[in-house]
């Protein structure tokens, strides 16, 4: 059901489905075929635990669970992809390991009713759209160097039984951090624009020639780590879908802080919105937006659904599903 907002005239959208509430404050979500072709699953994580549920999740009892054995791990995001080509998606659990004071990613796979660890790599892993509707996994190493904390961004590949950097660094002007960008063919030219968030949370589109910059802030996140003199924000991902007309729709999270500008620097959020935007030849216009009963740290496009991880004021999280 669509209702027109009385504030800004943007259509408001309600979720088609909501899951039960989980006893966890979700830090990451991934939707993929973890059990094999044709069977989607939902992976959810808090700061140290990962659970695998059906998709859409109709019960809080997990099909499998994993608990990081470290003293004080902090999971910052989840990603998925079948890089080893065995028909089941791997789960990439990126985290800050305080025991070894480093960022790393555990690669898990669901097999025989449980998660098994395939690898532990000293990189963060994040997915982005390649500009055609295909998700690409990328990796980045962070250094304890206040001058150059960000290593180069590379595609993540699986070769010779190992997960490693692919050939050719992904170099994007004005983008240093793996969690800030995606690529979208906004104007149908076949030359994807880079869509990224600036330091003040504004969406900017970088075309082959020219740029566009929005006015509203998006991508705020309570998941933050102070590293080499910088405060790293592990922002909710952009989600991108292409319709039958080949035109893209972009979904972005806007989290709203408890006390406005006073609490936003501390990552305290009590509400949020999902915005669907499309390119009208001049800029990104709002197609619709949805008010959430809390903030969001992750969204995912899966077949004909937009899945949103929502955490309420009680600290419990659920998955809301929208018709995109």
Image: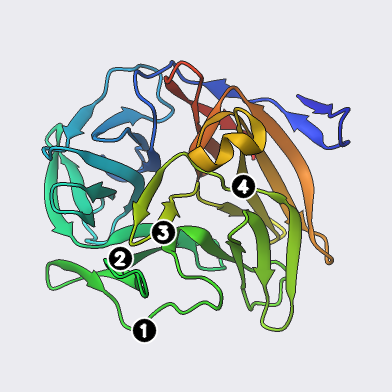
Q: Does dot 3 land on a helix, a strand or a loop?
A: strand
Q: Does dot 1 land on a helix, a strand or a loop?
A: loop
Q: Residues within 10 Å of mark 2 (few under 14, many from 20)?
A: some
Which residue is nearer to you in this view: 176 or 62?
Answer: 176
Which residue is nearer to you in this view: 4 or 75?
Answer: 75
- Separation of marks 4 and 1 at Cα, in angstroms: 28 Å
The answer to whether residue 243 shows anywhere in this view is: no
The nearer-to-camera label among 2 and 4 is 2
Residue at 43% across, 77% down: 170
Which residue is nearer to you in this view: 133 or 207?
Answer: 207
Residue at 38% across, 37% down: 27
Q: Which mark is residue 230?
A: 3
Task: Please state if 301 lies on the left or on the right of 78 as rendered.
Answer: right
Q: Does dot 2 land on a helix, a strand or a loop?
A: strand
Q: Is residue 101 above or below residue 173?
A: above
The answer to whether marks 3 and 4 mark residues whose Cβ atoms lie closer than 8 Å is no
Badge 3 or badge 4: first in the primary sequence? 3
Q: Position of residue 307 (x, y in %)?
A: 52, 36
The answer to whether marks 4 and 1 mark residues whose Cβ atoms lie closer than 8 Å is no
- The residue that disc 2 covers is 142
The nearer-to-camera label among 3 and 4 is 3
The nearer-to-camera label among 2 and 1 is 2
- Separation of marks 2 and 4 at Cα, in angstroms: 25 Å
The answer to whether residue 223 shows anywhere in this view is: yes
**Number of numbered discs:** 4
Q: Which mark is residue 80?
A: none
The answer to whether marks 3 and 2 mark residues whose Cβ atoms lie closer than 8 Å is no
Residue at 36% across, 16% down: 59
Which residue is nearer to you in this view: 250 or 16?
Answer: 250
- The residue that disc 4 covers is 252
- The residue that disc 1 covers is 168
Badge 2 or badge 1: first in the primary sequence? 2
């Amino acid at each position: 059901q669509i209702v027109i907002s009385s504030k800004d005239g943007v259509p408001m959208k309600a979720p088609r489905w909501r899951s039960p509430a989980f006893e966890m404050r979700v830090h990451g979500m991934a939707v993929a075929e973890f059990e094999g072709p044709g069977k989607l699953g939902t992976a959810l994580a808090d700061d140290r635990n990962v659970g695998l549920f059906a998709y859409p999740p109709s019960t809080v009892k997990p099909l499998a669970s994993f608990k990081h054995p470290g003293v004080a791990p902090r999971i910052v995001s989840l990603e998925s992809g079948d890089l080893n080509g065995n028909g089941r998606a791997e789960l990439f659990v990126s985290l800050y390991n305080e025991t070894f004071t480093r960022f790393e990613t555990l690669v898990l796979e669901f097999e025989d009713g449980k998660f098994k660890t395939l690898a532990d790599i000293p990189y963060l892993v994040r997915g982005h759209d390649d500009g055609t509707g295909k998700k690409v996994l990328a990796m980045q190493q962070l250094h304890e160097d206040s001058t150059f904390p960000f290593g180069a961004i590379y595609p993540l590949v699986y070769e010779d039984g190992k997960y490693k950097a692919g050939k050719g660094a992904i170099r994007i002007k004005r983008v240093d951090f793996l969690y800030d960008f995606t690529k979208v063919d906004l104007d149908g030219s076949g030359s994807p624009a880079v869509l990224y968030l600036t330091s003040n949370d504004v969406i900017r589109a970088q075309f082959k020639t020219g740029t566009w910059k929005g006015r509203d802030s998006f991508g705020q996140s309570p998941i933050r780590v102070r590293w080499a003199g910088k405060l790293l924000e592990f922002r909710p991902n952009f989600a991108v879908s292409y319709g039958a007309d080949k035109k893209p729709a972009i979904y972005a999270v806007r989290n709203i802080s408890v006390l406005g500008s006073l609490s936003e620097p501390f990552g305290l959020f009590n509400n949020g919105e999902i915005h669907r935007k499309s390119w009208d030849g001049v800029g990104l216009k709002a197609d619709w937006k949805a008010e959430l009963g809390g903030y969001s740290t992750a969204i995912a496009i899966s077949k004909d659904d937009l899945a949103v991880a929502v955490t309420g004021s009680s600290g419990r999280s659920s998955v809301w599903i929208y018709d995109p």
